Amino acid sequence: MGLDSFLHSSVSHPVLRAWAAVPNTLSATSLMYPLFITSDRDGKEEIAAMPGVFRFGVNRLKEALDPLIKSGLRSVILFGVPREEHAVKDDVGSAAEDPSGPVILAIQLLRSLYPSLLVACDVCLCPYTSHGHCGVLNADGTINNPASIKRLAEISVQYARAGCHVIAPSDMMDCRIGAIKEGLHEAGLAGNVAVMAYSAKFASGFYGPFRDAACSAPAAGDRKRYQLPPASRGLARRAVIRDAKEGADIVMVKPGYPYLDLVRDTKEVLPDLPIAVYQVSGEYAMLWHAASNNVFTLRVGVMEATEACLRAGASIIITYYTPQILGWLNEAKL
Ligand code: PBG
């Protein structure tokens, strides 16, 4: 089976079909909103390093999202935040697909509350492993790649069964896109579920606030053995091409602002795939603090940084500023 021959997954939802046409102006359809879902079901906690961003328990999602859906929200990406008191972290991240864990419950709830919302899920082991790395480790601390991609495929199938439309693996293990596509295919789900690959994902200092938010910092070491070195253009190009060959429906560049040249490179090497840009937690914080210190207004800084992603060639912008941008877009229409 040629995994790159799957096209049904890329057209299986109206939002996915809209992304197939590259927009040149910012609209609600371009925005994907990241949501941290805590296992504390009634919880709503502000993230210290990301003012204005919260972890929501599943029972708090409706009050948070109802107004955004009214403002035009089209898609979200879910990150599970298992609390120690609710989930045991182990070597292989077993809690990731707990049927009563935060991600599966949130998928089911969002699908039933908002029938036209596109629901994507980040798939990674780091929030669920005792060691905090994104894959399964060998005894000497190196990555066990075959065991890692098998786990990622298993978790993806469970999220897809729960109703997730887009699987977004952020782990950076080799060959996981092919393994996930095969897993979805064997489960009979490959035609209904798209895969958005975190492809050109760099070992970046801009993820600091996220690791606080998702409680996913590695217990020892760093992620340089599987995330890309910031100065490498060639590895980024190889990674996006590889993931496309393995069947990715969408490829991602992450972070955004310091890496927009690679968005343009990706557009050149893969003109036919939608590109997502992740404006990450450090970019969020940077813009926030700049605006708080009167460098510019938040609106001017955020709109410029976000529109630059579209100019570079992105169709999808994953941003914690989605609520504000939806509000500004709606104001502009008045
Ligand atoms: C998990 C993951 C990370 C981010 C998304 N998924 C952190 C990391 O790789 O260390 C970062 C997102 C952000 O900073 O907003 N692998």
Image (cartoon, rainbow, N blue to C red):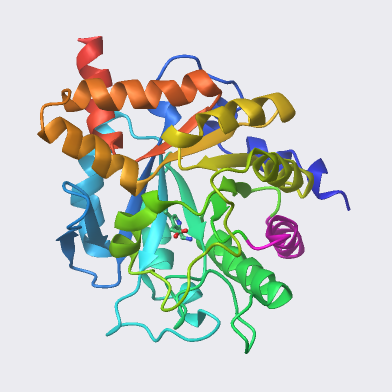
For image coordinates 59% across by 82% down, the residue present is 141
For image coordinates 40% across by 19% down, the residue present is 26
Name the image quarter holding the C terminus. top left
Residue extending furthest toward the right = 1
Residue extending furthest toward the left = 293
Observer-nearest of 19 and 13: 19
In this rendering, the answer to whether 323 lies above or below 76 is: above
For image coordinates 70% across by 40% down, the residue present is 234
Task: Inspect the magenta stretch and tell me whether residue 183 lies in it.
Answer: yes
What is the x, y in percent for residue 159? Answer: 53, 63
What is the x, y in percent for residue 324? Answer: 22, 31
For image coordinates 25% across by 44% down, the residue present is 285
Can residue 55 be seen in this snapshot?
yes
Q: Main secondary structure of the magenta part?
A: helix
In this rendering, the answer to whether 37 lies above or below 24 is: below
In this rendering, the answer to whether 41 lies above or below 106 is: below
Q: Provide the residue span drawn in magenta.
A: 173-189
Observer-nearest of 63 and 211: 211
What is the x, y in percent for residue 210? Answer: 34, 57
Q: Quadrant of ligand 1?
A: bottom left
Specify the quadrant of the image occupied by residue 161.
bottom right
Residue extending furthest toward the front = 231
Task: Inspect the magenta stretch and tell me whether residue 304 lies in it.
Answer: no
Can residue 320 be seen in this snapshot?
no
Residue extending furthest toward the bottom = 139
Left or right: 217, with 22 as reference point = left
What is the x, y in percent for residue 130? Answer: 44, 83
